[in-house]
């Protein structure tokens, strides 16, 4: 996966994506070793936690601070490891979630979720309700700032309910292709 890194901005580490692609045959095993140590010890290198925050305008002519959203530029290797953890540990637990945690109405941050899937589900629900009702009332809320108000205790309690595997199906020997 190191050799398939697309064009992306470098973070504070200054490591450009093209370098990872060129150096993949040489640094693959070392990178796999670092990733495996990080996963087995549940620690992340301090340098991989540092980010450059870039303000990105949300409107054509931004004026107040609220017209910008912060984009965190983390190191490419950090993003690669995050993708691996999500793919190997989180996604399988979402697909086999316990009955106490239902994700049927959640479309964001899921492997099978998308805005298109959410719209299709909403359209299906409305048309089904219209078959037995003369009208349907839809209330739409803007949750654009919702993540700013997440109760971390509730989020952590829900994560405890997930059956997260402590073992990945990807061995350290296959990191060179998985990363």
Image (tube, helix red, strand yellow):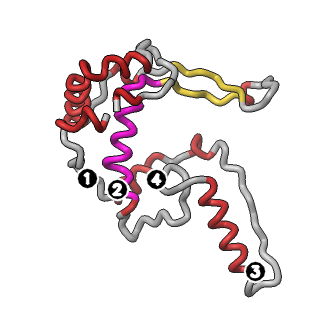
Q: Which residue is mark 1?
A: 165
Residue 71, how many percent across, how many down? Answer: 58, 28
Q: Nearer the viewer, residue 25 or 80?
A: 25
Residue 60 figure quarter:
top right
| Residue contact at pointers 1 and 3, CB within 8 angstroms | no
| Magenta: main secondary structure | helix
What whole-number distance in Å separates the C-alpha atoms at marks 2 and 4?
9 Å
Task: Give the residue drawn at x 76%, y 67%.
Answer: 138
Q: Earlier in the sequence, mark 1 or mark 4?
A: 4
Tell me: 16 left or right of 137: left
Q: How many marks?
A: 4
Q: Which residue is mark 3?
A: 130
Taking 11 as reference, is 36 above or below it?
below
Tell me: 138 left or right of 96: right
| Residue contact at pointers 1 and 4, CB within 8 angstroms | no
Residue 99 figure quarter:
bottom left
Check disc 1 and report its element: helix, strand or loop.
loop
Q: Which residue is mark 4?
A: 111
Tell me: 41 left or right of 114: left
Start and end of the magenta stretch?
A: 74-94
Q: Residues within 10 Å of mark 4 (few under 14, many from 20)?
A: some
| Residue contact at pointers 2 and 1, CB within 8 angstroms | yes
Task: Give the residue drawn at x 49%, y 57%.
Answer: 112
What whole-number distance in Å separates the C-alpha atoms at marks 3 and 4?
30 Å
What whole-number distance in Å separates the C-alpha atoms at marks 2 and 1?
8 Å
Check disc 3 and report its element: helix, strand or loop.
helix
Residue 76, how many percent across, how many down? Answer: 42, 25
What whole-number distance in Å separates the C-alpha atoms at marks 3 and 2?
36 Å
Q: Which residue is mark 2?
A: 92
Task: Give the residue drawn at x 47%, y 21%.
Answer: 51
């Amino acid at each position: 996966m190191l050799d398939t890194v697309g064009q992306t901005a470098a973070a504070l580490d200054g490591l450009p994506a093209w370098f990872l692609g060129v150096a993949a045959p040489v640094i693959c095993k070392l990178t796999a070793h670092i990733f495996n140590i990080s996963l087995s010890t549940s620690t992340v290198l301090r340098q991989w936690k540092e980010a450059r925050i870039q303000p990105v305008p949300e409107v054509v002519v931004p004026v107040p601070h609220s017209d910008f959203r912060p984009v965190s530029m983390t190191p490419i290797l950090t993003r690669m490891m995050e993708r691996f953890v999500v793919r190997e540990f989180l996604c399988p637990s979402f697909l086999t979630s316990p009955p106490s945690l239902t994700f049927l109405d959640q479309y964001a941050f899921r492997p099978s979720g998308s805005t298109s899937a959410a719209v299709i589900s909403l359209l299906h629900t409305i048309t089904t309700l219209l078959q037995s009702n003369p009208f349907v009332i839809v209330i739409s809320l803007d949750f654009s700032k919702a993540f700013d108000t997440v109760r971390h205790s509730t989020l952590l309690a829900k994560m405890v309910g997930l059956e997260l595997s402590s073992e990945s199906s990807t061995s350290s020997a296959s990191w060179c292709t998985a990363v």
